[in-house]
Image (cartoon, rainbow, N blue to C red):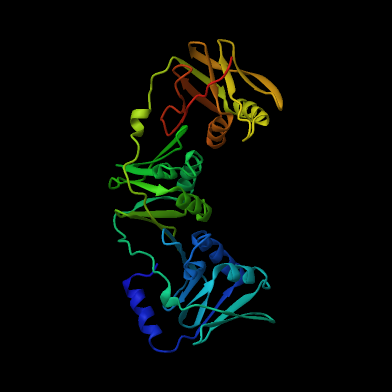
């Protein structure tokens, strides 16, 4: 990201009339940087400059930046600056070129006519660039009062909730995730109208209270970029309209979704008439088999029958066939028969790490809750109608 000082440097440099730039970096490092920022390149746009990566070598670091005006990603590139400068280069063409170069050092040179020369060993390519000063700079965000956590933890939090987000929905709030902090706890919530996924984690220190809605695309792209290592930290900064994730060498800046999120806590309940404990592996295997008998065109309900002895899972498809499984459980409360979309159950089971899980039911018309004792995770799944 260019702060005010960097932007002034760029402006002074550009007006010298000497726009030549020479930088050198290993092919593998260029590929990493391109792959990192490519998520911010829009699929369709009428603004040609947004299809480009900004290469900024006007100060002491080489930086690659891409933005679609809603999401911006900037990463530092390990390399050498022989002559300072900046240029915009078509992202897809640049990516394709670098991927086909020898595994060696790459030199990128520009001239005053915005022509780019890329050389690597005995290979030389020339392409046209665009004026880097026309590139939209990323918003400046004050780096105060960060939320600090491991990249591993944030990546896990996203993975364990984002599957419940609505990809396309008339209600834009459902296309985002609620991220909120309270003292030394952070919580992420996603919902799509049929289910809710909640993940809570403890922080190392007390932080200011924030409550924001982050676009699902931002979180999906962030999940791909993060290292996933426990020792690697992410610093999160919030403003009224944006969020910034600092990954120590890469930053991701995103606009927030405006609006008041749903009253999640009013949708949650600790009441139950039936409670079961089951081995996750057994239930996952059974639900996986049930999904063989459903499809997008023929969504068949998974019928769950709970008795004192066991839990029976049954699915019947006129087009594909049928399945019936009996699974051993530990049960408290009443017998129950209830139906679910098997995919929603499978999605929750796929991200739970516990060997045993506990599921709470109220009745056949109310949602079930999959949660642990500490409620570090909660998965609410609405039932579906079925014919017994």
Q: Residue at x 60, y 70 (%)?
A: 93
Q: Position of residue 222 (x, y in %)?
A: 48, 53
Quarter occupied by the C terminus = top right
Rendered image quadrant of residue 175? top left
- Residue 192, percent from left and from top: 46, 37
The image shows residue 80 at horizontal and vertical percentages of 52, 78
Locate residue 183: give its quadrant: top left
* Res 29 seen here: no
Vertical placement of residue 296 versus 222, above or below: above
Residue drawn at (68%, 70%) of the image: 100
Q: Is residue 119 above or below residue 230?
A: below
Question: In screen coordinates, is 342 left or right of 249?
Answer: right
Q: Looking at the image, is 262 positioned above or below residue 326?
A: below
- The one of 359 and 300 positioned closer to us in this rendering: 300
Where residue 202 sits in the image (x, y, percent)?
Answer: 38, 40
Q: Quadrant of residue 322?
A: top right
Position of the N terminus, as image quadrant, is bottom left
**Front one among 354 and 241:** 241
Residue at image point 43% right, 43% down = 170
| Residue under the point 45% across and 62% down | 68
| Any part of residue 140 in sight | yes
Picture mark count: 0
**336 left or right, relative to 70:** right
């Amino acid at each position: 990201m260019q702060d005010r000082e960097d932007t002034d440097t760029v402006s002074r440099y550009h007006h010298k009339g000497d726009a030549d730039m020479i930088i050198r970096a290993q092919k593998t490092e260029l590929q990493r940087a391109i792959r990192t920022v490519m998520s911010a390149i829009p699929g369709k746009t009428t603004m040609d400059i947004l299809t480009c990566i900004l290469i900024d070598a006007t100060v002491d670091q080489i930086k690659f930046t891409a933005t679609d005006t809603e999401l911006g990603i900037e990463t530092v590139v390990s390399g050498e600056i022989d002559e300072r400068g900046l240029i915009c280069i078509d992202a897809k063409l640049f990516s394709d070129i670098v991927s086909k170069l020898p595994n060696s050092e790459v030199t990128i040179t520009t001239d005053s006519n915005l022509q780019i020369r890329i050389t690597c060993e005995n290979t030389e390519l020339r392409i046209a660039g665009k004026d880097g000063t026309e590139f939209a700079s990323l918003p400046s965000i004050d780096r105060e009062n960060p939320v600090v956590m491991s990249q591993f933890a944030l990546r896990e939090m996203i993975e364990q909730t984002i599957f419940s987000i609505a990809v396309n929905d008339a209600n834009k709030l459902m296309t985002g995730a609620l991220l909120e902090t309270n003292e030394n706890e952070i919580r992420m919530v996603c919902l799509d109208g049929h289910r809710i996924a909640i993940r809570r984690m403890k922080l190392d220190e007390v932080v200011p209270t924030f409550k924001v809605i982050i676009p699902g695309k931002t979180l999906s792209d962030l999940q791909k970029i993060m290292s996933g290592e426990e020792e690697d930290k992410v610093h999160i900064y919030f403003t009224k309209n944006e969020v910034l994730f600092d990954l120590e060498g890469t930053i991701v800046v995103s606009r927030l979704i405006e609006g008041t999120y749903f009253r999640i806590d009013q949708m949650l309940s600790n009441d139950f008439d039936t409670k079961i404990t089951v081995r996750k592996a057994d239930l996952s295997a059974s639900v996986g088999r049930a999904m063989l008998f459903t499809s997008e065109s023929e969504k068949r309900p998974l019928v769950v029958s709970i008795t004192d002895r066991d839990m029976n899972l049954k699915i019947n498809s006129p087009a594909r066939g049928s399945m019936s499984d009996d699974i051993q459980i530990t049960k408290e409360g009443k017998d129950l028969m209830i139906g679910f979309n098997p995919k929603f159950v499978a999605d929750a089971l796929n991200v739970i790490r516990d060997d045993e899980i506990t599921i709470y039911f109220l009745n056949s018309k109310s949602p079930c809750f999959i949660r642990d004792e500490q409620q570090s995770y909660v998965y609410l799944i609405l039932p579906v109608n079925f014919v017994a």
